[in-house]
Image: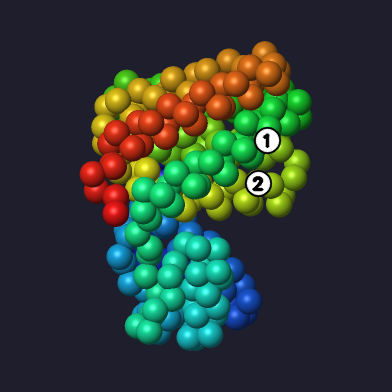
Amino acid sequence: MAEKADPKTKTQLYAGMSPSSLRTQIYADLRRRLQRAELMPGHRLVDTAVATQYRASRMPAREALMVLASQGFLQQTTRGFVVPELSAADVRDIFVVRKLLEPEAAATAARNLDDDGLSALAAARDLALETFADNDVEGLMEANIAFRRLWLSAVGNPRLVETIESFRDHIQVVRIATLRQAETRAVVIKGIETLAAAFAARDEAAVRAGMRAFMDAAEAEFFNAVRPSLP
């Protein structure tokens, strides 16, 4: 598992970059932190403080925050930007969209994956099994992200991939909390194993069905685990 970057080292990396490069790097790092639930619902981000953190001027920091807000990852307020809290209805709507897009995208990936891609998927599956056996919650999360990125990289449609990633990231903050539940981890590992086998067989129908079943189970487990805490 990769170690978290030291803040001082990170800001040194950003020093001397052009404003557009800084904006891109700040955006990418903040989105990564959102994906890993390092910034939880209610967390406030102020452009001046973000600029200081990344040793940037205020403008690229604000532009990065504005892009995240335009994509729904942040909400703009009179006192900066806030990580939003999703309602149960929000989460259900997001699952509806994901179920429309992801099974077909995964079936496309099954057609496109080459032998190297399948080997990488198998390695990600094996890592997921290892972390599951060790009750390593963060490790399982990273293995799941790696498995997902590998098949998404074979879809061949950047706009579709970005849309899928965006909708998943919207609920990632709440979803990560459910991985503390053993039942949820079992759903994740079963889904990864089923999909890995279907991808290995290059069986588009099995991949499509496996993805739908995985998402149905994930949604049910999600609401079993977090429904009382959702507005």
- Identify residue for label 2: 161
Q: Could you tell me residue 56's position as x and y percent? A: 48, 81
Residue found at x 26% / y 32%: 181
- Identify residue for label 1: 105
29 relative to 20, above or below: above
**Comes first in the chain, label 2 or label 1:** 1
Q: Quadrant of residue 103?
A: top right
Residue found at x 63% / y 51%: 162
Kind of residue at badge 2: Val
User: In the visual, does 4 lie left or right of 198?
Assistant: left
- Give the crowd class for mark 2: few <14, some 14-19, many >=20 residues within 10 Å: some
Q: Secondary structure at mark 2?
A: helix
Q: Quadrant of residue 117?
A: top right
Q: Is residue 126 visible?
A: no
Q: Could you tell me residue 70's position as x and y percent? A: 55, 69
Q: Could you tell me residue 26's position as x and y percent? A: 51, 69
Distance from the alpha carbon under mark 2 to that under mark 1: 8 Å
Placement of the C terminus among the 4 image quadrants: bottom left
Residue found at x 48% / y 51%: 169
User: In the visual, does 139 lie left or right of 95?
Assistant: left
Placement of the N terminus among the 4 image quadrants: top left
Indicate how the structure is coloured in the image.
rainbow
Residue 136 or residue 215, whichever sits in front: 215
Kind of residue at badge 1: Ala
- Give the crowd class for mark 1: few <14, some 14-19, many >=20 residues within 10 Å: many
Looking at the image, do the residues carrying marks 2 and 1 touch, with CB atoms under 8 Å apart?
yes
